[in-house]
């Protein structure tokens, strides 16, 4: 990952929390919004972990990342591949497996588990919203523009533009409109 890619991902995450980018707003959001603070350290560890020459700084950053992880009750692996626009609405009880692949504009709520089953982890598309307490496990594919309801248990593939609810989850309906960046 290049420094340009790191900055791009961080800005995309930032825009999930604030509409106008400036250093002042970045600092305000960092101290006011735990989800963004977590995203910043996650992105920094991803960047530094791939730079062997910066390994001592990576160890320090990883220590801060783990401290924030414990403080906020989140276990999101720095090896998970998460695209830009990560929005963590509220922290606590969020687990994302190291093998998970998640696209851009991913919105997650508390108590969500994205885990593996028999070695396979989910591959989640772009513009996906996951409700509180949802469980997504196994080597499954979640399409683009999908909404997963609260407390849904997803163990099968989900097509694009679907709304998924229930335990075990099933497609409730296919959305007619594309993704809208609404303020939940």
Image (cartoon, helix red, strand yellow):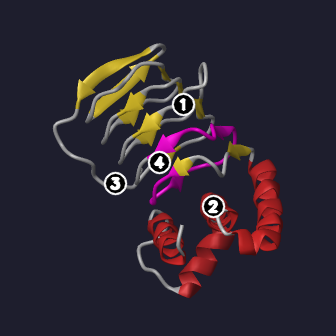
Asked if disc 4 and disc 3 are in contact, CB closer than 8 Å, the reply is: no
- Looking at the rendered image, the disc whose residue lies closer to the viewer, 4 or 3, is 4
Asked if disc 3 and disc 2 are in contact, CB closer than 8 Å, the reply is: no
Q: Which residue is mark 3?
A: 182
Q: Is residue 19 left or right of residue 46?
A: left
Which residue is outermost to the left?
Answer: 176
In the image, is residue 68 above or below residue 48?
above
Q: How many residues crowd around disc 2 within 10 Å: few (fewer than 14), some, or many (20 or more)?
A: many
> Looking at the image, which residue is at 45% across and 62% down?
16
Q: Is residue 106 left or right of residue 66?
A: left
Mark 4 to mark 3: distance in Å? 11 Å
Q: Which residue is mark 2?
A: 46
Q: Which residue is mark 4?
A: 107
Q: Is residue 96 magenta?
A: yes
Mark 4 to mark 1: distance in Å? 18 Å
> Looking at the image, which residue is at 76% across and 67% down?
58
Q: Is residue 169 left or right of residue 89?
A: left
């Amino acid at each position: 990952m290049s420094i340009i890619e790191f900055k791009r991902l961080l800005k995309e995450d930032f825009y999930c929390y604030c509409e106008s980018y400036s250093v002042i707003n970045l600092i305000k959001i960092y101290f006011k919004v735990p989800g963004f603070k977590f995203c910043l350290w996650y992105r920094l560890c991803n960047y530094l972990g791939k730079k062997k020459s910066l390994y001592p700084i990576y160890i320090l950053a990883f220590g801060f990342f783990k401290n924030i992880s414990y403080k906020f009750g989140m276990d999101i692996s720095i090896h998970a591949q998460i695209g830009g626009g990560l929005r963590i609405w509220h922290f606590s009880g969020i687990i994302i497996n190291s093998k998970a692949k998640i696209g851009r504009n991913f919105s997650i709520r508390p108590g969500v588990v994205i885990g593996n089953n028999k070695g396979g982890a989910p591959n989640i598309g772009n513009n996906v919203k996951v409700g509180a307490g949802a469980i997504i496990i196994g080597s499954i594919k979640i399409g683009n523009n999908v909404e997963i309801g609260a407390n849904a248990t997803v163990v099968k593939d989900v097509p694009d533009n679907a709304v998924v609810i229930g335990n075990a989850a099933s497609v409730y309906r296919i959305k007619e409109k594309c993704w809208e960046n609404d303020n939940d």
